[in-house]
Image (spheres, helix red, strand yellow):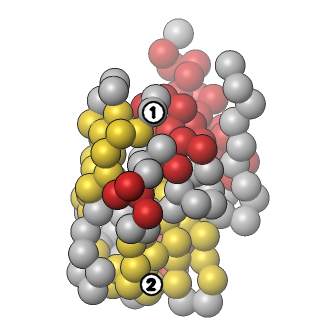
Amino acid sequence: MAILEYPDDLYYSKEHLWVRVTGNRGTVGITDFAQQEMGEIIYVELPTEGSPIEQNEVFGSLESSKTVAELYSPVSGEIVSINKDLDEEPSMINDDPYGKGWLISIELDDPTELEELLSASEYEDFLEKKSENKK
């Protein structure tokens, strides 16, 4: 099994998404764990720019050869950009989940929502407990 990465400068949701905050903008993507669990991503459905989004609301989906997964927004705000490159190359999510494989960028409505998300170490603990519960 590959060693999974969880950068310390990100916030994580229990739905396996991350947020990188710069100013009042959050870039969102799926975690290394999620992309590995899904397998090769073959299709991405994302919302249109300018759409409002609420925390924990579905904003799109990912399809792999194994499954289709809905994407739940970790924060509220307005979607200011989407990663259009994923239309042509959805596998960028697998290759670089924390870089070129980002999904959307959101102008944050309420930065205090970030306090509800997990740090990298908390997310790793969450995954460990989830794994133990499967045994």
Q: What is the x, y in percent for residue 105?
A: 45, 76
Is 1 drawn above or below residue 87 in the view shown? Answer: above
Picture residue at 62% right of the left edge, 56% below the top:
98
Picture residue at 26% right of the left edge, 56% below the top:
45
Question: Which image quadrant: the N terminus?
Answer: top right
Q: What is the x, y in percent for residue 26?
A: 52, 76
In this rendered view, identify the residue nearer to me: 63 or 132.
63
Picture residue at 38% right of the left edge, 68% below the top:
84
Q: Which numbered circle lies on residue 40?
A: 1
Element type where label 2 sits in the image: strand
Is 73 drawn above or below residue 126 in the view shown? Answer: below
Element type where label 1 sits in the image: loop
> Residue 127's image quarter?
top right
Picture residue at 34% right of the left edge, 24% below the top:
66
Q: Is residue 82 left or right of residue 102?
A: left
Is residue 82 something that shows in the picture? yes
In this rendered view, identify the residue nearer to me: 9 or 43.
43
Q: Earlier in the sequence, mark 1 or mark 2?
A: 1
Q: Provide the residue designation for mark 2.
A: 108
Query: Do the residues under discs 1 and 2 have CB atoms within 8 angstroms?
Result: no
Q: What is the x, y in percent for residue 118?
A: 59, 56
Which-is-in-front pick, marks 1 and 2? 1
Q: Which numbered circle lies on residue 103?
A: none
